Amino acid sequence: MKALLDRARTFRTRVDFDSGEYRKLAEGQYPEVLFITCSDSRVMPALITGARPGDIFELRNAGNIVPPYGRPGASGEAATIEYALEVLGVQDIVVCGHSHCGAMGALKSGDDLSALPGVDAWLHIARPELAPVLESAPDDPSLPEVSQGNVVNQLAALRSYPVVRQRLDTGRLRLHGWYYEIDTGFVYELGDDGAFRVHAA
């Protein structure tokens, strides 16, 4: 924590806030993409994509889960999706899962999460649609089949939002599925045929 605090205290001296780039950020944000990914500390969207401040609007939670539209109660996920599309006008949404995901690992192993009721309730959102993959996927610690299957399911959940469907129907929005491999740095992209592939640099 001390190292993080020290860097926060000296941030102003390490960045040129007198440049036009940073001054412009105060005028508003115009991100190109809504990036939905896991809270896992090893997954850093700006590092993976090379994004600069203001480029991406992030939505992060355990397991990069998108609750289906219309679930009762307030939802930070629903609010973020609506704001990104209706106010910021993003034209691309990426759902990015990753290898060695703790949330997907808990679902795969069927861990007893009674001591973590909030985690258990949250993962329950993803569990039913992911059940076929959980049963058939091999016991691989990197969990590619489970994490990739979850990405596909969360893209489907996104399509349950009227604001998403409207923009898809009119060609104003594109959805992308990614799978980030932590130990190699490879980013796999979901193709139209339902397969995840690494694209050549």
Image (cartoon, rainbow, N blue to C red):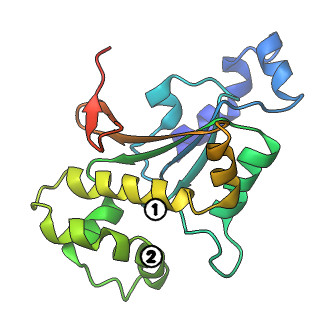
Residue 11 picture location, percent across and down:
68, 27
Q: Where is residue 39 in the image (x, y as percent from the top left)?
A: 48, 54
Q: Position of residue 19 (x, y in %)?
A: 80, 10
| Residue 161 picture location, percent across and down | 64, 61
In the image, residue 165 sits, relative to residue 23, either above or below, namely: below
Residue under label 2, please give it: 119
**Element on which disc 2 rests:** helix
The tag on residue 62 is: 1
Q: Residues within 10 Å of mark 1 (few under 14, many from 20)?
A: some
Q: What residue type is labelled 2?
A: Val
From the viewer's perspective, is residue 19 above or below residue 181? Answer: above
Left or right of 140: which side holds 11?
A: right
Q: Answer yes or no: do the residues labelled 2 and 1 have beta carbons within 8 Å?
A: yes
Residue furthest out toward the top: 19
Residue 179 appearing in the image: yes
In the displayed orientation, state which residue is furthest to the front. 169
- Answer yes or no: is residue 143 visible: no
The image quadrant where one finds the C terminus is top left
Of the numbered discs 2 and 1, the one sitting upstream in the chain is 1
